[in-house]
Image (tube, grey):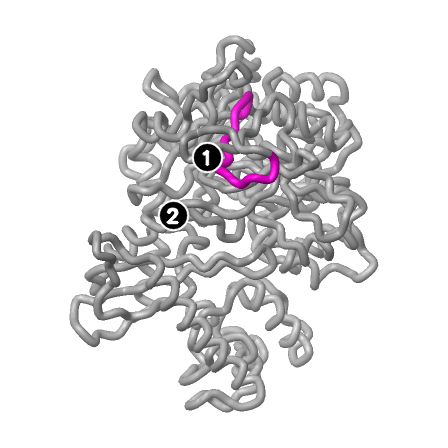
Amino acid sequence: MHFIHAFEAAAKRTPQAIALVVNDQSISYARLQHMAGHYAQQLAHKMDAKTDGILLCLPRGVELMASLLACHYLGVPYIPLDICTAPGRVMKILAASSCLLTYDSRAGHIGGADGADVATFSAVAQIKPVPAENPAPAAYRIYTSGSTGEPKGVSVAHRGCSNLINSFSRLLEAGGETRWLSATSVSFDMFYLEYAVPLANGGTLFLLDDAQTHSVQEIAWQLMRCQPDIFQSTPSMLKCLLPYLQDDWRFNRLLVGGEPLGRQLSARLSARARWLCNLYGPTETTVWSTAHVITRAGDNRIGRPIDHTQIKILDDARREMKAGEPGNIFIGGAGVALEYLNNPALTAEKFIALPGEQTEGRFYDTGDIGLIDAEGVLNYLYRDGDFYKVSGYRIDCAEVVDALEKCAGVAAAAVVVLEGDGDDESVIVGWLKMDKPGQGIDTGAIRQELENELGHYMIPRYFYPIDDLPYSISGKLDKKALITMTKTKIKEMEHIVMGQKNAPGKDALNHPLIDILGHYINIDGMSLNDNFFHRGLSSIQLVSFHLELKQLYPDINFHDLCARPTINLLLAPYH
């Protein structure tokens, strides 16, 4: 059963039950169903024969959910984008297909999209869902980082979505009384699970708004206030959340995935959750493909396949490995996506048919290396190739390099990702060869240009100048040399920071907040107007900085540091 028909059935069973809660606004199933029908009618008037999707760039709220459901009613794939998405990235996505653009007038930078039909909504008439046999095969499209410098559209099938809902409804025992809290970005495929499972089962979705999701302090407060039955998050987010949760507060059912789970964090979460499940799956196989309920602190295995899913561990010749032997992870079954939009060559390369009587349909080559242990449980080892996971998002270095080389004054660029071990953060570093020898890097200007092209999670934390990029004898970029250079730079910076814990940085201003910042970043030459993040402060360091800062300024919230990331701006209300 497609999601929209499950939603219709839930609305028919319990029309007055609460489907959606946003801040103090509660929406019943009957009301949400009615709004979605109205929105579908309006979108239908805007569509034509060429429309192959509807791009949703709306604030997190009732209108977003009604619009999303409207797309399901119409049987047209939706393309979800966070309202903070870089305008340049939105334009690239619009150029890749014939999709309608919906946007909120408050996100004015998107409203002037050339050639885009802008859907505005008003109540007209109810529309019934399209028959189950008629909707387009794709339920939604998610754009991920692409190796050509362009966003890569993954078309995800209704079949995979239905299988995901059925599998997790059983795993989580998600009945009509189940309460979910959603803090995941709508442009992250994890969001599909967060709304689809509760709304398909008659449960309640607590949807945090954009301001709330941008503050881990606020997310923690909402978790303790709402007491949801189920919460889903990445390891990076959970590491930031834990310090803000009361010591005796525990998650009921916690889903963690999107990047490797470290053993230390697994142990911490085991003590903070009544039920803990580690998940694994790329966007191309419909959110999650394996699940592992953790019953032993420190266990970080990624589990067994969900329903109608196959996992193969193969060598480079695509021969199956024995238990305990590492190899390439291939995923087959109901969750395998349809295609990369308008990219048949890449589709053929990554979605393949494997020989053998026990393999049905296509398999997706994940690019990940893993093994199946003696207990039959999948273990993740590392990523092969130039794709990485940073804060749960998949990053292709080629896209970041492409954006860097468009920046004024940059002649050539290279990007290195130092992956964390699951307990430490991953770090993106940019190496820049400037047009003029000896020319300094204006990191503020470069960041500003990148913010128009890339997602915030793709922007390097550090930028280093280089006279010439290193190349191997074959003429290829010497990645090993760059990684070695990067690790050396990071160690030098850590050495400086460690020294600053007991002594002020050279040329640093004599200010107590800068002294505190010196516990985390290099404060040499720092001014009261320097941006914390431009100086290299990470999200996890930001949590620690905030907790220290509250001892001096108890009223400063986590969101204040994000909104006013300089000493002068942060302290302006106190002057």
Q: Neighbour class for label 2 at 10 Å: few (<14), some, many (≥20)?
A: some
Look at 44% across and 23% down and name the residue there. 338
Q: CA distance from mark 1 to mark 2?
A: 19 Å
Q: Is residue 562 left or right of residue 20?
A: left
Q: Residue at x 36, y 68 (%)?
A: 485
473 inside magenta stretch: no
Residue 40 position within the rendered picture, expressed as x and y whole percent measured from the top left: 50, 22
**What amino acid is labelled 1 in the image?**
Asp
* Residue 386 circle label: 2
Q: Position of residue 327 (x, y in %)?
A: 50, 38
| Residue type highlighted by circle 2 | Asp
At a point 20% along the width and 76% down the height, the residue shown is 438
Q: On the rendered structure, is 323 left or right of 252?
A: left
Mark 1, secondary structure of its residue:
loop
Q: Which residues are magenta?
A: 323-335
Other residues around mark 1 within 10 Å, as few (<14) / some (14–19) / many (≥20): some
